[in-house]
Each structure stands twice: as C-alpha cells, then as structure tokens.
Amino acid sequence: MRFRIDLKIFLFLIIFYFTKQIHIYALIMIFAFIHELGHLLAGILCGMRPEKLEIKPYGVSVSFKLFPKDYNIKIGKANKLEVKKILVALAGPLTNLLIIIISLNLQIETFIKLMIVYSNILIIVFNLIPIYPLDGGRILKSILHITCGRRKSEKYINNISFVTLILVTFVSSILIYILENIAIFLIVIALWIMYISEDIKYKRKLEIYKLLEKSIENN
C-alpha cells in the first residue's frame, strides 16, 4: 500500500496555529485517521485490497484497488462491488459514532469528553454530506448505481454534489460571519477543491462515452 502526504497540510497547520485553533485541528485529524482505519478494516473484511493511504489537509483518505472481476458479479440490477462500497463508506462514520459512545461512558474530565464528542460529531456530519467523494456522496452514488445504472449515477451524483455544495457554501457564509471561525472557510474551500477535481474527471468520462458511442455508430 502506497503512502502520501499532501503538503498543503502544513499551510493548514500554520493557519490554525496563528488562529489559536491548532488543538482542535490536531484532535480532528487524529479521529479522522481512526475514521479511515474503520474504512480500511471494512474494506479488508470485504475482500478489497488497500492501494493508497493519503493524509490531506482536511483528513485522511484510503483507496482500494478494484478488480475487473468484481464488476461481473451481479446482485439484482447492480453488483457486489457497489454493496461493498456502501459498507466501506458507512464504516467510517460508524467508527466515529462508536468513539462517541465509548467516550460518554468513560470516567474522564468533562472538557476532554466534550472535545472528543464534538470532534467526532464534526467528522460524522462532514463526511455524510452528499458531496462526492465524501462518504455520503459515495453511499448515494452506489445506491444510484444499483437503482439507475453507472452512467446515470455519475450524472446524478455530480449534479447533487454541486447543488449541495452551493447550499453548504451559503449556510457556511452565514456561520463564518456569526462565529468568525476561519476553520469553516477552510472546510468550504476544501469541499470546492474536491468537487472541481471530481467534476473534471466526470467531464472526461463523458468525452470517453461520446467517443465510444460514435465508434459503435460508425461500426
């Protein structure tokens, strides 16, 4: 399994240090790593092979190597791979929920307990936003794939991600004004970067689909 660190994380560290929020950022990154271990364990249990672990400014990401044979095993209208993806995506937020439950039952200082609960709730809420490639977006895309097929799922999740991001940006703008918290601004920027990256990939796929369709028509 390959390992990579996004160097922009150091910029985030500097920003959070000077805004005196470094302790919150560090705590969130620790639980984000545990969150990703949940994905990793679920993937291994589902028979998937880990390919890359990447530390990003807004969390940790693990990806799995996909095999062509997985696409050929059908379950209803979809295949086992999509079911595996849903289980793996759910494993992360469930890991954070388990941490919250355990911490609430531990005999520790109230402040520490609140920080643990607060950090993990943030991670759960952030990851379940239906924006691809966050967990919520992955789950929704796989469900759409099962019900509508691959091409429609890609189209729908791209549109849903854009609309959701607009709403998140609007709400976040109000929160930034009220709370004066730069962390919210950085999260929104990170979400836009993720969306733009996935949108570029989606448009490239559309071009490939069109070329394939033309090739079929010509033959």
Image (cartoon, rainbow, N blue to C red):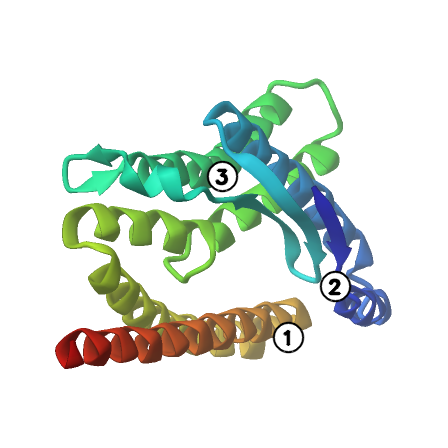
Mark 1–mark 3 distance (CA, rounded to whole Å) = 27 Å
Task: Say which label, 2 or 3, has the lower sequence index.
Answer: 2
Task: Name the residue type under label 2.
Answer: Asp
Q: Is residue 42 above or below residue 212?
A: above
Residue matched to label 3: 93
Using a 10 Å C-alpha cutoff, classify the residue at mark 3 as few (fewer than 14 neighbours), some (14 to 19) or many (20 or more).
many
Q: Amino acid at mark 3?
A: Pro
Considering only order in the chain, which callout, 3 or 1, is on the residue closer to the N terminus?
3
Instruction: Give the SS element for disc 1.
Output: loop
> Closer to us: mark 1 or mark 2?
2
Where residue 195 appears, x then y in whole percent? 47, 72
Q: Position of residue 90 (x, y in %)?
A: 43, 37
At 75% from the left and 49% from the top, the residue drawn is 3
**Helix, strand or loop under label 2:** loop
* Residue, disc 2: 6
What residue would you read off at disc 1? 180
Residue at 68% of width from left, 42% of height from top? 33
> Quick one: 1 or 190, which is closer to the camera?
1
- Mark 2 or mark 1, which is nearer the start of the sequence? 2
Q: Is residue 96 visible?
A: no
Q: Position of residue 18 (x, y in %)?
A: 85, 71
Query: Quadrant where the N terminus lies?
Result: top right
Q: Residues within 10 Å of mark 1 (few under 14, many from 20)?
A: few
| 153, above or below 89, in the image | below
